[in-house]
Image: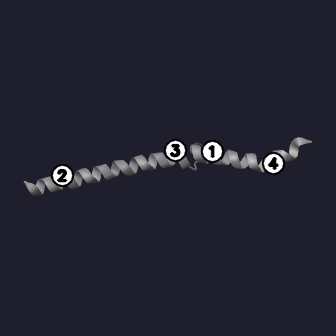
Amino acid sequence: MQKEESGQVVVEYILLLVIAVSISAIISTSVVGRNQDSPGFLTKAWSGLIQFVATDQTDDTN
């Protein structure tokens, strides 16, 4: 009886580990995804910030 329970614990642990890794992969892709078609929101915001700084709008006051 105890051997079956320890096997069940291992199976549950592996399933929880698979679920945790899947959720972390989804979150990672949505936050910092580098796909050209759908970049992550952090990557998109960082790119916008870099473009804003690169335009150097303080020189455009003339």
Q: What amino acid is labelled 1 in the image? A: Lys
The first of marks 3 and 4 along the sequence is 3
* Amino acid found under the numbered disc labelled 4: Asp
Q: Dot 1 surroundings within 10 Å: few (below 14), some, or many (20 or more)?
A: some
Residue indicated by mark 4:
56
N-term-proximal mark, 2 vs 1: 2
Instruction: Determine which residue is flagged by label 2.
Output: 8
Report the mark closest to the observer, 3 or 4: 4
- Local crowd size for mark 2, using a 10 Å CA cut-off: few (<14), some (14–19), many (≥20): few
Amino acid under disc 3: Ser
Q: Circles 2 and 3: CB distance less than 8 Å?
A: no
Secondary structure of the residue carrying numbered label 3: helix
Disc marking residue 13: none
Choose the circle earlier in sequence order: 3 or 1: 3
The image position of residue 8, as x and y in percent, is 18, 52
Seen as rendered, the residue at the extreme right is 62
SS state under label 1: helix
| Labelled pair 3, 4 in contact (Cβ < 8 Å) | no
